[in-house]
Structures are given as C-alpha cells and as structure tokens.
Amino acid sequence: MTKKLSKVNDLKKVQLLKTAYNDIKNELGKRIVGQLDIIEQLLICLLARGHCLIIGVPGLAKTLLIQTLAQVLDLEFSRIQFTPDLMPSDITGTEILEEDRTTGQKIFKFVKGPVFANIILADEINRTPPKTQSALLEAMQEHKVTVAGETYTLDEPFFVLATQNPIEQEGTYPLPEAQLDRFMFNLWMEYPTQDEEKEIVKTTTSAYEPDLKPVIGAEEIIEFQDLIRHVPVADNVVDYAVSFVSMTRPDHDGVPNFIKDWISWGAGPRASQYLILGAKTRAILDGRPSPDIEDVKMVARPVIRHRLVTSFNAEAEGIDTLTIIEKLFDEVKL
C-alpha cells in the first residue's frame, strides 16, 4: 500500500482497508483452501488488538494458515510448541553471562525469546503447566516482558493465536476461566467440505508453490487498528451488546429460566467491550463506517462461547455454550 495512511481521512481509510482485506483474502487463497469465516475472524481479532484461541483437530492447516497470514501481512512470525517441560524463560527470553573480549569483563546480556515477534503461534497451549501459560498471558495483556527486573516492550502489532486439540485431553492443563477471558475470540476450525478437501489434496500433492506477495505491513496495520477506535457506534448497538452479555448472568434481573438452569457464571464486561470492537471491525472490513446490531450478532459466538461456565444441569442434558447463545438471540430484543 503506497499511500501514507496518516495523511488520509478516516472515510478514505475505510475504503483502503476494504480493498486491502479483499487483496489479503486473494493472497491467502493461493495457499489456503476455504476457511473464509476463520480468515475474516482472525483479521477482526488482529485489527481489534485482541488475541485468539483456535480449537481444531490436527491436520486442519492451523499452523499453515497463521504462517501464511504473517507472510501476507509482512509481519514477523514465531511458533512456540508448548510441552510439559517448557519454562517461562523459553518464551520470554533469558539473561546469559557473556565475556567482553576487549576488556575481559563479564556482563549479563538479555537474549530475546520467541515472544518477541508480531504474530505468535502458541501451539497446544494447554500442554504446559499454568506457570508457563502465565508467562505468555502476561505478555498478551501488557505487551511487555519483565526479566530480572528489567522491562522490555514488545513490537507492535502483537497478536497471539493459541491452539488447542479438542480430542486429546490426557496430560493437559486446561486454561482457567480468568485466562480464557483474555482471548477476544474462541474459534473452532471445522473439517473442509468434500470439494475443498479434493482441492487441498490436489495442491499439496503436486509441485505447486504459490507466489505470495505482502499486501500491507506493520505500519499500516497499526494505522488501521487506530481507525477501529475512531469508529462511531450508535447507542442502540451498545445497548444490545451490553444487554446480551447481561443476559448470560444467572443473577441478573429478568433472565430467562434456561440461563438460571444451565449457567453457573456468565460473561464479564470484557465480553461487552469485545462485542463492540468486533462489530466495529466487521463493519469497517465490509466498507461501512459504523456497525449495526447484526454485526454484534455475528461476533457474539466467538466472543462469548468461552466465557460461560455451564452448570451440572447443562452438562447432564448435553447443552453446550453455543446452544445457549443461539437461544439468547431469540430472547434479547431492543
């Protein structure tokens, strides 16, 4: 993108972002088959300065998608494979004792860990103990790392995508609710359709190698992230988002009986914030200057599904959080 974004007004930026979004999808489509909803939600999360938890079985190209996204956005990519023996210093970095060859003096030098990148893939984050999980989650919240009393600021944009395998739960350390709440979106990657799988097999078993070109870079992404904060939102859209989140809380006045039966703890205020940020970003990606209630509905599932703690009754009846969210769409009206 050649035009200097800082010299362009906000309405023009909206159009530039829509054009860039279409170009990004086209470039990703050279290597990634399908997954258009996931791609849209990843970009919403990135532009809203959120982080994303992706759940999917092995072999759905989660790593390939995120690597390709980093390449198309011209961002530095880092992958961390979480294992039971991973230490916090393996993520943040560590100090080593080094000798100055000219003076012979020994000094401590900080060696940066893999968290010092723009896009971080935290692969199977639930395979490492809470102490190590916390090292990454602190960086996600503060965009800073503290080692040996020294604080280091991470480069912007800073985007963490953590993955979990829904099948193998043996030897895992599930993320506590307070830590899950730090992820803006919880995305579930589904199996490809039969036609998509045919296309995947054809391209991956041939000599085809796509020629990917960067569409935008870090500077433009930061400008677009700032643009999201400038997007105006009508009061009725904010009212809908807050009402929807309030309705997930069993002790809130006027909640339907199924919420009292199926939910132990509802979503907190961060869910309302992310609903509005997600709605704003979705509208801008579509070239619209302001979101509507439909935008809030479209981001409600990934924002809220991991923030609800279901009761024993829900588990006994086989009710999951997505079912509860779908029922709430019929209940919350303005």
Image (cartoon, rainbow, N blue to C red):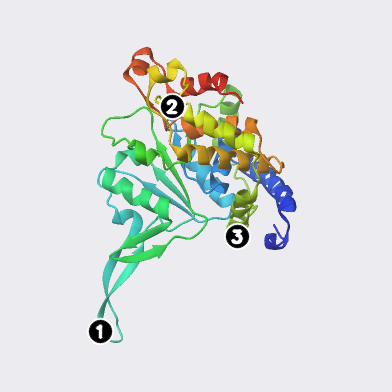
Q: Earlier in the sequence, mark 3 or mark 2?
A: 3
Contact flag, marks 2 and 1 (Cβ < 8 Å) = no
Alpha carbon separation for disc pair 1 and 3: 41 Å
**Which label was assigned to residue 252?**
2
The quarter of the image holding the C terminus is top right
Q: Earlier in the sequence, mark 1 or mark 3?
A: 1
**Which label was assigned to residue 104?**
1
Q: Badge 2 local density, few (<14 within 10 Å), some, or many (20+)?
A: few
Within the image, what quadrant is residue 252 found in?
top left
Q: Secondary structure at mark 3?
A: helix
Disc 3 marks a residue whose amino acid type is Glu
Report the mark closest to the observer, 2 or 1.
2
x and y percentages locating residue 332 in the rendered image: 56, 23
Q: Residue at x 56, y 51 (%)?
A: 71
Q: Residue at x 62, y 45 (%)?
A: 210
x and y percentages locating residue 112 in the rendered image: 37, 62
Contact flag, marks 3 and 2 (Cβ < 8 Å) = no
Alpha carbon separation for disc pair 2 and 1: 67 Å
Q: Badge 3 local density, few (<14 within 10 Å), some, or many (20+)?
A: some
Q: Secondary structure at mark 1?
A: loop
* 303 sits left or right of 227 in the view: left
Q: Is residue 321 above or below residue 36?
A: above
The quarter of the image holding the N terminus is bottom right
Within the image, what quadrant is residue 8 found in?
bottom right
Task: Tell me the residue that label 3 is attached to.
Answer: 219
Alpha carbon separation for disc pair 3 and 2: 43 Å
